[in-house]
Amino acid sequence: MAVNEARTIGRPVDRVDGPLKVTGRATYAYEHRAAGEPLYGVIVGATIGRGRVARIDPSRAERSPGVRLVMTHENAPAQGEPDPSIPSQYSRAYPVLTGPDVHHYGEPLALVVAETYEQAQAAAPLVDVEYAARPGRFDFAAHRDEAYAPAVINAQLPTDTSTGDFDAAFGSAEVTVDRRYTTPYGFSQPMEPHACLVVPAGDELVVYVSTQIVAEARTAIASTLGVEAERIRIVSPYVGGGFGSKLGIHAETILAALAARALDQPVKIALTRQQVFHLVGLRPMSSQRVRLGAGRDGRLVAIGHEVTMYTSPRWEYAEQSAASTRALYAAPNRYTTHRLVPLDLPRGEDVRAPGDAPGLLAFESAIDELAFALGMDPIELRIRNEPTLDPERGVPFSDRRLVDCLREGARRFGWERRPARPGTLRDGRWLVGYGVAAAMRMQFQMASRARVRIAPDGVAVVQSDMTDIGTGTYTIVAQVAADALGLPIDRVRVELGSSDFPAGAGSGGSWGASNTCTAVQYACDALREKLLASVQRDARSPLHGLDLGRAELAGGRVTVDGASEALADIVARNHPDGLAAEGEIPPMWEDPNYGAYSLHTYGAQFAEVGVDVDTAEIRLRRMLGVFAAGRILNAKTARSQLIGGMIWGASMALLEEGVVDTRSGAFVNRDLAGYLVPVHADVPEIDAVLLDGFDDKANVLGAKGIGELGNCGANAAVANAVFNAAGVRVRDFPITLEKVLAALPSVESRTPRRTPRIGA
Amino acid sequence: FETAADAALAGARGRGHNDFKIELARRTLRRALADTALGE
């Protein structure tokens, strides 16, 4: 069925849920007021990094005012074990308080449940714990030699790839780069901490939880508690950010469910900001070796990318950091590898743009180093190595516009003003530099379903368990349905985030918008067919007997050759209880396009930085991203997503770093005072430009995901700009001033001599 | 100004990871004094 000519799709429609959010009427997980006064839970975490609980005594806490339950491994109910044969880790059981072993600092050892939050908080320190500590592995550098190869890496991608003869090609290349880059531990840190309210309802549990994927949360909770999934109801209409950390459920959700079931009362838990650092996953630290070999003309002959990263030994996580390297540039001889270093730290999980964020930071920095070694413009180098086919899969790209992004970005950014030699452009006390990097992100398609129902009053209601994690899902779903059914957008109501609704793939992997909206489109198409079938049978309709193949839906009416009837009237007369239809899409491994083509989104990231000539302070001066992601569903929300990702990229390059105390395994900077993220003053001029297009291999809407594309390469653009500004190449991220300071020339050679105006 | 910075930082001892702060302080002092002398 052809897509109706777009009327609201693509336009910068304001968020339909905006008024609810700014007036405090959008209810988040911890804010729900369900039947019955809730009890409040506070988690007690381990204060050692590895060992055993030798003794745990809850008696003082139990006697504390208002305390109703203290759960430890000694009285926690039996729970299901995670099934490693389930491909998605987020669908697996998540048992807690399973025994006395301590696997990482902060691991839950007890849950204190009381009548008020303050009572639970006061009682938590009264849980007496004695440890038998054991030496832990906390230092990545010290244990790097223990790295092993996982069976697969994230997204079920192959661990290693190899084409041609890299060693021979690299060994004979005219110009080579062989560099190692390290990226730190990183955290999602959504504005809304992880929280939930669990309400017993007969033999069911209603779980109000901040989650990105409702269906997986339901499966994981059910399998952990040992009940059928139908006995778990998930309610998650609004989520205050996730960025990967809410793809799966975590300890607070299971603990709340166990306590609610034990006490037969609602129980709510919210993690503190400090607990978020230890309990909801993190981006692993990585050490990446990138080797590039090229001819003097800049054409790559050899690409090598080796990734070594941290993993928890108990919960393996292998970030796909060399995945984009496999498809970004042409080179006949290439290899990529991924290796894991087991450490006794909290588990690694997806953090926005997993793989590509740290991987492109290293790889695109190395490309910039190659450009410098060649004496070539870094944009020209990238264009010169543009592949015609996917370099490793050998299939055509569905819609690749990286070169367009680079050229358009160069024009808009004023790239011609970039100093050819690093460290030569001054603006007062600032050394100024420009940097560029490519952005690339794989397009995913996951099974998704949606339902659309038109009521006799002509209002269309779209239902999906899809979540809105701040991305604008409510709005773009409304736009798609409005266009498909020819309704004004205010005649479309969107209901999300409930396990009562058709299951989708949720928000993650940048797949949410394109997948859900395609399912919605199909649902609307099916509904349109049912509607027209009604007209065909309805002799009372002014459209009866006309050629319904020429029917147009617009303005809430159905029109055929000048004859028209309100859609509401058709429904009211023929379907007094409303008319509904469902639509669905298959997962990518069942869609032939994803096998026949290489589907990605692309971008070009530009950054201008200033480096203080005396103090090496680094300041972002402006950023520009030009992106191509097929059809854009909403120009406003898409731009917001991309800008947010770009800021994240700059943050990764300059600020964010989880610091581990290698004595205890604790993250020492576990709050937003110590774990630095940008504030408004850190981000001046920033813009994202979208090259609209249509990728007909992706889906019927031509749309691809953009939720993470803004992260990709933005960090490398900033790093490359720092090099262009100061002539200092930092390969140990984040780039902090002490890493630049030592290489800056002495003050006297830099500070312009001026005649002091003494006594003036 | 360099002499003044050296005097101010005489005896400063870093702890390894924060050694850079001594050089940073030296540079900052020089610049602050230079800016002050220039009336900036």
Image: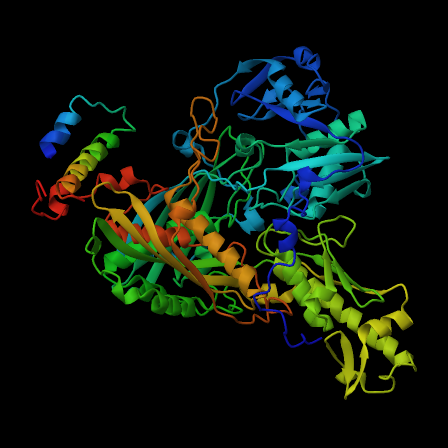
- Residue at point 27% right, 23% down? B15
Nearest the viewer among A395 and A756 is A756
Residue A497 horizontal/vertical position (percent) = 71, 50
Q: Is residue A725 above or below residue A632?
A: above
- Residue at point 46% right, 69% down? A401
Horizontal side of residue A526 vs A301, given as left or right: right
Tell me if residue A110 can be seen: no
- Residue at point 20% right, 43% down? A744
Q: Is residue A139 above or below residue A546?
A: above
Q: Quadrant of the C terminus of chain A?
A: top left
The colour mode here is rainbow
Horizontal side of residue A174 vs A34, given as left or right: left
How many numbered tags mark residues here? 0
Nearest the viewer among B17 and A155 is B17
For this orientation, the residue located farthest to the right is: A539
Q: Is residue A103 above or below residue A554?
A: above
Tell me if residue A611 can be seen: yes
Residue B29 horizontal/vertical position (percent) = 18, 34
| Residue A180 picture quarter | top left
Residue A250 horizontal/vertical position (percent) = 64, 35
Nearest the viewer among A614 and A281 is A614
| Residue A451 picture quarter | bottom right
For this orientation, the residue located farthest to the front is: A760
Horizontal side of residue A288 vs A348, given as left or right: left
Q: Quadrant of the N terminus of chain A?
A: bottom right
Residue A686 horizontal/vertical position (percent) = 41, 57
